[in-house]
Image (cartoon, rainbow, N blue to C red):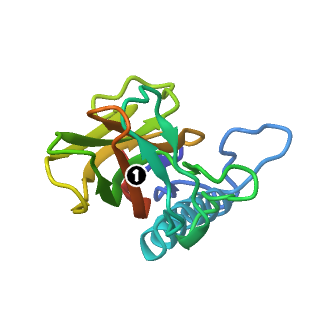
């Protein structure tokens, strides 16, 4: 009879086995050596895939230096339009098709960041709040690490100063989820924020078993 290793279930001969022992297919007998070689090759292919991902992990980084003017008092989120790809190792970015988003191409844990630098234009000594968020389409699996909306804001009370909220977090994303960046300014109507630089990026950290 055929014996199997644990835990990978690789078949091997026992001392009493025939070299042509049938491992389960009566019409097309196969030898345990062929089964062993195929099983080992499958394990090596799996290992090669893991090594390839670790050597070149999925990541994407998009950016824009084109100014956006955000008028305080507008309660709607304004989507960020990116025009530059700084990095993309897994075909996660297509600015021609969707210049506001990154699409996840491998399920797993990700390090995600969003950064915005802007200049305030205030009519008086008003409080000005610049809020940014990453909105992701819902995941199919309700994983404990999953967040579909990441938000950060910064508040100042000075005119003509730089304001720079930054968001950095580790979370779970699934293949097919689309991440988009949005900005919103709050305070006294007619005050404004003008962006100078906006960046968004993700980097794969590993799988969840």
Residue placed at 29% from the left, 55% from the top?
A: 120
Q: Is residue 169 above or below residue 126?
A: below
- x%, y% of residue 159? 21, 56
Q: In the rendered view, would you say 130 is above or below 96? A: above
Q: Position of residue 67 (x, y in %)?
A: 50, 62
Is 188 in front, or is 143? 188
Helix, strand or loop status at disc 1: loop
Tell me if residue 17 comes above or below residue 28 in the rendering.
below
In the shown orientation, is residue 26 left or right of residue 41? right
Q: Position of residue 177 (x, y in %)?
A: 55, 38
User: 142 or 70, which lies in front?
Assistant: 70
> Which residue is more in the foreground, 5 or 147?
147
Q: Is residue 178 visible?
A: yes
Q: Crowding near pointer 1: few (<14 within 10 Å), some, many (20+)?
A: few
Q: Quadrant of the C terminus?
A: top left
Q: Residue at 58% of width from left, 70% of height from top?
A: 84
Q: Is residue 69 left or right of 94 when viewed as pictured? A: left
* Residue 7 shows in the view: no
Residue occupying the point 23% across, 42% down = 128
- According to the picture, the residue beneath numbered tag 1 turns out to be 5
Who is closer to the viewer here, 115 or 7?
115
Residue furthest out toward the front: 123
- Image coordinates of residue 206 in percent, x first then y, are 36, 55
């Amino acid at each position: 009879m055929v014996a199997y290793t644990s835990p990978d279930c690789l078949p091997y001969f026992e001392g009493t086995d025939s070299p042509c022992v049938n491992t389960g297919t009566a019409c097309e007998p196969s030898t345990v050596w062929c089964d062993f070689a195929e099983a080992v090759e499958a394990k090596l292919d799996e290992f090669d895939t893991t090594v390839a991902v670790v050597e070149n992990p999925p990541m994407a980084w998009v950016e824009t230096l084109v100014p956006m003017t955000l008028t305080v008092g507008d309660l709607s989120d304004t989507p960020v339009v990116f025009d530059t790809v700084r990095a993309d190792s897994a075909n996660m970015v297509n600015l021609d098709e969707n210049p506001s988003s990154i699409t996840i191409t491998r399920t797993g844990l990700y390090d995600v960041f969003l950064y915005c630098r802007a200049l305030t234009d205030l009519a008086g000594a008003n409080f000005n709040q610049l809020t940014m968020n990453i909105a992701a389409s819902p995941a199919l699996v309700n994983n404990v690490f999953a967040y579909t909306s990441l938000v950060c804001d910064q508040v100042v009370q000075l005119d003509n100063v730089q304001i720079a909220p930054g968001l950095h977090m580790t979370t779970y994303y699934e293949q097919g989820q689309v991440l988009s960046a949005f900005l919103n300014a709050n305070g006294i109507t007619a005050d404004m924020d003008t962006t100078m630089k906006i960046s968004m990026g993700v980097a794969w950290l590993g799988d969840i078993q």
